[in-house]
Each structure stands twice: as C-alpha cells, then as structure tokens.
Image (cartoon, coloured by chain):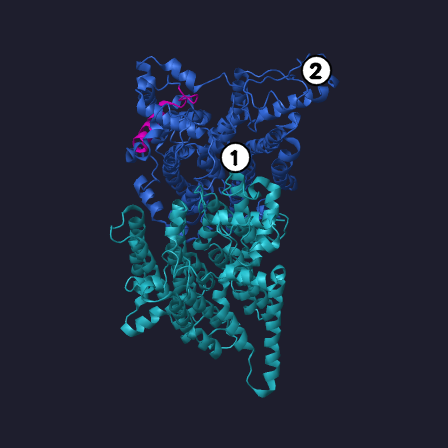
Chain colours: A cyan, B blue
Amino acid sequence: MLLKTKSLSTNVKISLFLLMIVVSLLARYLVSLNSYSGQGKPPMFGDYEAQRHWMEITTKLDVHEWYFNTTDNNLLYWGLDYPPLTAYLSWVYGKIGEIVEPASMELYTSRGYETPTSKLFMRATVIVSDLIIWIPSVWFFVTSFYKDKTITQKIGAFLFISLQPGLLLIDHGHFQYNGVSLGLALFAITFIIRDQQLLASIFFVLSLNYKQMSLYYAPAFFFYLLFSNLEFSFSKLFSSFFKILKIGLVVIATFIICWIPFLSIEQASQVLFRLFPFSRGLFEDKVANFWCFISVFINMKKLFSTEVLIKLCLILTLATMIPLFINLFKNKNSKFIFLYSLINSSFSFFLFSFQVHEKTILLPLLPVSLLILHHPNTVWWFSVISTFSMFPLLFKDGLIIPYISIMVFFIVFGYQYKNEILKSFNNLNDPKTTSNKTMASSKSITSIISSLLKINVEQYSKYWYALNIVGMIVCHLLYQFVPQPSGLPALWLLLVCNFSFIHFTLTLLDFIIRMFTFNPTKVKTF
Amino acid sequence: MIKSEGQDPANKVCFIGELKSILKQTRNWNLLLFITTIKLLLIPSYFSTDFEVHRNWLAITSSLPISKWYFENTSEWTLDYPPFFAWFEFTLSKAAYYFDKGMLEINNLNYSTIQTILFQRFSVIFSDLLFIIATLLLSNLIYSNISNNNKNNKSSSQSLAWYQDKSFLVSLIVILNPGLLMVDHIHFQYNGFLKGILILSMYFIIRGNILVGSVLFCVLLNFKHIYMYMAPAYFVYLLIYYCFENKKNNKFSISNINIFNFIKLGSSVLFIFALSLGPFIAMGQIPQLLSRLFPFGRGLSHAYWAPNFWSLYNFLDRILLFNGLYKKIPFFKDLIISSDVSGNLTSGLVGSDSQTHAILPKITPPITLLITVLFLIPSIYGIIKSKNWKDFILGICQSSFTFFMFGWHVHEKAIIMITIPLGFLSLASNNRFSKLYFILSTVGHYSLFPLLFKPTEITTRILVLAFYTILLYLSIISTNQQSQSKKQNNNNGLGLYFYEIVYLIGLIGLEIFNIFIHPFYLAHIEKYSFIALMITSVYTSIGIHYCYLYIFKLIFSKD
C-alpha cells in the first residue's frame, strides 16, 4: 500500500500516518518493558495483580458471583470494584488469556502469577485496548475539532494528546486501563463537538460504565445537553422537552443494556455498594488536592465527623462548579465553553471531593490536553505538573528511569512544540494571513496579571518555568535521598502534593477566567 | 597537532570550531535526547551471554595483574579482545566499584544484580556519546560542504527546516541505526563507541588530517580486531594519498614517494601497536594473546548462518542432501554419505561449530581468504579512482562487506559494520545511494532478528525496524523533493523496482512464518526444528548479495 500509491504527496501522507502509528506503539511498548505496580511484592502485589485477578474471577465464576463475597471470591483480595464494562472486558481478555497461558488464569493458584509471557500478555491487552479505543478516539477528536489544520499539525496534536506522559506511565508502566474510559469519554466529547448528541450520550454512559471516575465529567455533559436543548419560547417548549426526553431514554437504555446481568435489586445494590465505598478516608495517602493542602494547617479528620466532612466536600465541589453552570447557560452550543466546563467539573471533583486518588488527575488532564493548539503554554505546563504529581507513586513501582527519561523528553520537546504553536499564532496575527484561521479568543491568567501590574508578564514565563523545574528537581532529590525529619513522617510527600496543588489551582483559575472572558464572536471554527 | 596537519586550504575552521557549531544546534541536542530516551527505556530488555562476558572482563581486568589477563579461564568467557579493550574494561571497573563490588569478583559467575545491570547498560549508553558526537561531526563536515559548494551560501544549511537539512537527516539515519540498538542496547555489546572511533577517524581523514585519522584507526584495531575488515581500504587510501601523494595532479606513481609522510605514518602506527602490545611482548605472551584473539578452531559459519555467501553454499549442500537429491546429479552420483549427516535438513550445521559439508567441497580458512582478496580488488579500485570522500566511505563499506560475504566464521552482527558507514552516503549525490541503503538497511537489520528471540523482544525488534524504515523512507523522499531529481521520483520516490518491493514485502511474510507458524507447527518436528533460522538466513542472504553486487555497479558507473 505504501509503495504502490502513484502520487508522491499521498505517499508521504501515508508514511507519515504509518510513522505516527508506529511511534504510538513503540512508545507504549518501550514503557511496558519496565516494571509494573506491585511487581514481585507479595502478598497483595498491586494494580497489575488486581486486573489479572479480575480476569481470573470473571472467567472462572458465574456472573452473579462477581461482585459478592463468596467462598471462591474473596473481596478483600482485590475484589471487583469497577462497573460492569470493566468486568466484561476482563472476561474477554481472561478468555484469551486462558488460551495463551492457562496457568495464569487459574482460580486460587494464579494469585501473584508473574512470568515473562504473562506479563507480555497483560501488557499487550492494554496496548490493544489503546489501539481499539483510545487512539481512534484521539484521532477522531483531532480530525473533528482541528479539521482546518494541516496534516502535520493534526499529527502533532494527536501525538501530544495520545502520548501524555502521565497517561503513558500510568497505563503502560503502573498498569491500568485508563485509555478505555478516557477514550470512550473522548468519543462522547467529539460527538458533542459534531452535534451528534445521542451518540455522545451513549458513549458517555459507556465510559461511566467502564470506570465510575468518568462521573467527574457528568456535570459538564449534563448541563451542556440540557441548556443546548432547552428553549423557553412557548412554541418550542414542547419540541425541546421531546429532545431532552429522547436523550434521557437513550441514556437509560444504554445503562440497562450494560447492566443486564445485574438487574435484580440485590445484585444492583451490591454493585453500587462496591463502586462507591464511602467508608475509607478523606483522602487516600497524600493527594495534591484541597484537603491535603488544608491538612497542613487544620486537622480536619479530628475536627469533624466523616458525615460532616462528606457534606463539606459536596458543598465545596458543587460551589466551585458554579462557573460552568453560568457559562453553559450563557453560551449555549459553544464547544469551547463545553471543553472549559469539562475542565472545570473534573478539577472541582479532583480538588474538593471525597476519596480522591492521585491518578485521578488524568481526568482533568484529558480535556486540558485537548486544547493544546489553542492554549499551548498552560496545556504543556499542566501536562508536566500532572505527571510530576504522580511521581511518588511511580517511584514506588520501580519506574524511576522511565519516569525521568520521559519527563525530560517531554519537557524539552513539549517546550519546543508549544513555542512552535505560539509562533504560528504570531503568524496568524499578521493581517495578511488571518482571513480564515481560527483560534480561541479569551484572556489568560497571565494577561490579567499583566494588565494589573502594567508590565508584560509573558516575557518572564521562561524564568517561571525554570524556577519551577528547579523546584521539581529539588522535590525529587529530597523524596529519594534525604531522610524525613523524625517528627514529620510524610513531609516530602506533603511538599510534592502542595507544590502540585498550587499549580493545579492556578490552572483551574486560568481556565475559569478564560471561560468568563471567552469571546464567541471571534471564533470561526464552528 | 590538528592545526599543523591542516594541509587543505579549504579547512579554515578548526576542529574545535566544528565541534562548537554542532553543539550549538538545538536539533542535535534533540536527537541526542530522543535516542537516549529510547536506550534508557530498553534497559529492562533481555540481554545475551555477552552481558556476562563483559562482566567477567570487568572482574578480570580489575582484580588480576596484566600478566594474567590473557591466561585467566575461570569463566568460559575468556578475554578475547585486544589490549585496549581490556584497558577500557579496566577503566570501567573503577566506576563499577561504586555501583556493586560483587560484579568485580571473578568467581561470581552470571552475577546480575540490578546495580550490575544498570551499571553495564549505563556504560554502553554513556560511551555511545562518542558515537553520536563523531556522527554529527562527520555528517556536518561532508554535507555542509555540499550545500556550500552548490549555493555559495554558508548560512543556507542553518535556515533549513530539520526535515530538509541533509546533514541533520544523515546524522539521524546513522544515529538511530536499529542494528546498533538491537546489538548494543538489547543483546549487549559495546559497538557504539567503537563505531565512534571509526567515524572520528574517517572524519579526520576526510577533512585532511590524515595522520590523526590513521592513528585513530590503529587505536580502533587495538580495541577490537574485527575492524581489520576495513583495513585494506584504509591501507590503500593511506598509501596512495599520503605516502605517494602527488599534489599537482593527484595521480598515483611510485616515483612520487613522500618519504617524510611515510616515516611519520609508519612510526605512529608502530607507536600505537607498541603501546598496546608492548607489555605482552615483554612478557612473552604474544602467542597466547593471538590464540585468544584468533580462535580458528571455530567453523565456517556461526550457529545461525550469517546471511553471506556461505549461507547459500551451506544451503545448497543441504538441498542436495535432502531426500538424496544428489544421486540424480551426475557429478555427485557416486558420493558416499555417512549415515549421521544424511536425512536431516538442518542438523550438523545449526547449533554446532564444527560442521562439515556433506556433498560440496569442504571449505578451509585459506580458501575463504583467497576469495576475499579476489573480491577486495574492485573495492580498492574504487578508492584509487578518485580522492573523493564518497569513494573513500564506499571503499570502507565494500571492504568490510567483502569480508562479511566471504570471511571465515563471520557473525551476523557484523552487518552493522557495513550499514553504519554506508548510512553516511544515504543522501549523497542526489540520492544515488539511497535505494541501496534502503534495501540493505531493511534486509540487513532484519537478518539480526534471530539475535532477539525472546517473546518480549520479538515485538521490540519489529517496532524498532518498522520505525526506522519509515523514517528512512521519509527522509529520502523529503530530500528528493528538495534536489528535484525527477528521474528518481517514479512511483515511490525511491526508484524501487517491482521485484524489489515484492522481495521487501516478503520479509513481512517471513516474519509471520517465524513468529506464528514455525513455533507452533514445525518446531517440535526434529527435522524442521531449525528451518526458520535457515530460511531467514537464506532469504536475507539473497537480498544482501543483491546489495553487494549493486555496490559494484555503483563503483564502476559514473557519478
């Protein structure tokens, strides 16, 4: 195919496309050569063992036993706590695993099963999932949202979004299938952008049913769909009501299909109980969110009971989502506002909600990274910081070398890439070429500060990045080599969390400001 | 030392200046970062027994006096590289001490703690810096000259985008060489920095510092003696253009002998060899050292036949033997075959070093030497023809290619001794060599696949080669458009003929057979247990013969 095509330019296009696929595969595969969470660490191992155990449980046990604590299914040993689609996918991979290496899927005896071939198989399942869902979803998004860009710009955006270092290291290093839930969510996002709302609802429900974390996006989806269909004039009230009803029915139908084996009250309540365990703590370990930040000053767990804390979480989470509510109402059908509100809602959950895990930063990362060709500075920097915030986890998994090499790679290449994008903006401002090009017009946090201080802050950004990178290096060194002071056990971890928290909050603020200052008339894309 | 050698008036910029100019370019740093990231991620890959070989050498050189280096035999992996390499290991062992002292114990056989693995892998990655710098220097030298001559504009190459800058693309093509990644960073060896010394020596010779270049080549020979494959090309070049130099018309004649140069060259070569071998001459250990360096007890072909002439020869022998085919051919009709070799298609050749041919005449080391010398003559002709850097590099390639094709006990890894120097020609002379390099790189590096046979590395090898091949294709295409040689732009931009495309695509089929069909359906039948290796060797050997003949065509045709 590559060599037969007549025209030279199509030849180049095809080989560029092939190169893009091979690079995607190569990057994933190279990371996957390294160790995974809990490798060689009995008795509980880690996320890798959890996923393998689910394959074992789903293939060997009856579907009604999956979520219950039975003699053959000890829920205390990595019991299934993800929604049904995860279980189904585990079943599919488990069935293949039974053919490839039966011993790795045996009930009981396979616990902590670690052979080079079974590792290869497990790694391959993640890469295959990416190939089937995540990679197509990113390409679909890029060709829809950035359809007026050139092929090289599209490929650049594709690689930037699909090979986010955080996602790469968590999925292919630490071991998880985030690409599936994020990919399904991205399909939903893209269908919203293409104004195909029913398909969007189906894919969003699928994403929710793969991993309940996708709930972080739900407010944005819900209000976007609601406001874009709601018409208050009397003549259209009925038709808009009908549209919303249609979406509601599609959502319910998709849910029912996903939950077919679990439709009895007993089953459904047990699954829900497994999915939302409120009994754990306020935050798992130390996470770069508000509660970890505030714990430096106030010990919330001693001051309030768990119930009060849950309510507090809920109130703060909802309160910080007010911007998205207002803006989605003001700008119906604006795709930019939709993407901003995805960022807003996922950040609100991450920063203020109950029971957050540090890997959850991948959820805000997805909508942020989608905007790379519009806000390169913020997006690139947030990608760096979000990966940084997970480094204690990655160090624990023995992924120090891949983490460092990929971070350095990403910081250097990402920096040059974002400068290239900025350069193309300057070309856009050139009146000769502005005619048909588009870019989001909104004010960033730096432009606000600049106008307040009456100096151009932008020119100092280089020093800001350099300063923070030095800070990050210091954090790594402290964490890895310097013993904690005796009175303060997780001091370095707290430092890392709060360092990240400050940057996360700035990023959120930046996007909220952009949302309010967004000027829809200047965007011509849609 | 360098400035005094600058005989060529065109070399106004000194060596340090060139080094500075390559370090100034961001894209070169990007390339370094890119390849280093790949190498670092490859660290957990499988490594071969060569890992233990080098660990053992670390232990020998660090814990024994020099007099015992070439006698020590606790491990089966005795020291069989020349002294400079031993000194290199000795230097490394000083740093190894701080990683894990255990790896420096001679009796710690197969010692491979995480620290040991990290140390050895890091040492390869680190020593590769020399290779990268040398490559950047050489490609900058030869390709910026081209653009300067063409356009008379020195800044032109600076302003080019990276995908149009030939000097950068060539360093990309050489530095990303998949063979080197597979052999050094997965299989485990130290070819990178040795190639660095080679390239540096080529660099100095091409820019006119012939004495520095030849000293570096001597140093290289004393690191690893396999570089003797290139010695004939060097020897002839130095003889003609240094010792018998005629500055007026560049023509070779005995009467032009430059005694002063001759003495300079001879004494510096002797000095390097004295430095390396002196201590062993003094201790009277030369016979022992030579017996380690040249173990002729090994067979004609390695366990996996390197895809050279002998691969086809062995194959023909096996085919004739198969089902008694030889009885139908009049010449061999009366041959008596001992029962232990008959009947099996592959045994006796694969997995054993002391194989003999059943039907075709037996090959001995002198025969291989004779054939090699015979075929070396054309490559030397190429050098004599002109004092052109392209002919010099081509001569080096053809010299090592000839040894690869006809040498005694050639290892398949030696293919990178051809592809790396040839990589520098890949975009030269309006892409005249591009097609050759494209085919040779694809086939030659594919022939390394049996080195990486573990399940995890099977995917790595395919992805690495696929990545490189597509990148190479794109580099050639993008420079094609630039030089607008419309002749080459037929169909696919490379000028590949239909049968060449079919042959290259056949590699995909071969790989599918090797991964999915052979292990599941044929490997357990004794008769066919090695057939995948044999087919790989023979199939790639055909392509490599094609490339070998293609170089002859290039040597004898006009630029």
Residue occupying the far front of the picture: A71
Image coordinates of residue B414 in percent, x first then y, are 49, 29
Mark 1: secondary structure: loop
Q: In this view, does A195 lie to the left or right of A30?
A: right
Q: Is residue B197 left or right of residue A144?
A: left
Q: In which quarter of the image is residue B535?
A: top right
Residue bounds of the magenta highlight: B74-96
Q: Residue A23 carries which label?
A: none
In depth, the one of A198 and A295 nearer the eye is: A295
Mark 2: secondary structure: helix
Chief secondary structure of the magenta portion = helix
Q: In which quarter of the image is residue B497?
A: top right
Q: Is residue B408 magenta?
A: no
Q: Which mark is residue B332?
A: 2
Q: Which chain carries label 1?
A: B
| Number of residues whose C-alpha sits closer than 10 Å to that of mark 1, classed few (under 14), some (14–19) or many (20 or more) | many
CA distance for labels 2 and 1 = 39 Å
**On screen, residue A139 above or below B73:** below
In depth, the one of A67 and B340 nearer the eye is: A67
Residue occupying the far right of the picture: B328
Q: Residue B452 carries which label?
A: 1
Residue occupying the far bottom of the picture: A234
Q: Quadrant of the N terminus of chain B?
A: top left
Q: Which chain carries label 2?
A: B
Identity, as a three-letter code, of the amino acid under mark 2: Phe
User: Residue B397, can we see it?
Assistant: yes
Q: Say which label, 2 or 1, has the lower sequence index.
A: 2
Image coordinates of residue B144 in percent, x first then y, are 41, 45
| Number of residues whose C-alpha sits closer than 10 Å to that of mark 2, classed few (under 14), some (14–19) or many (20 or more) | some
Image coordinates of residue A370 in percent, x first then y, are 47, 63
Identity, as a three-letter code, of the amino acid under mark 1: Leu
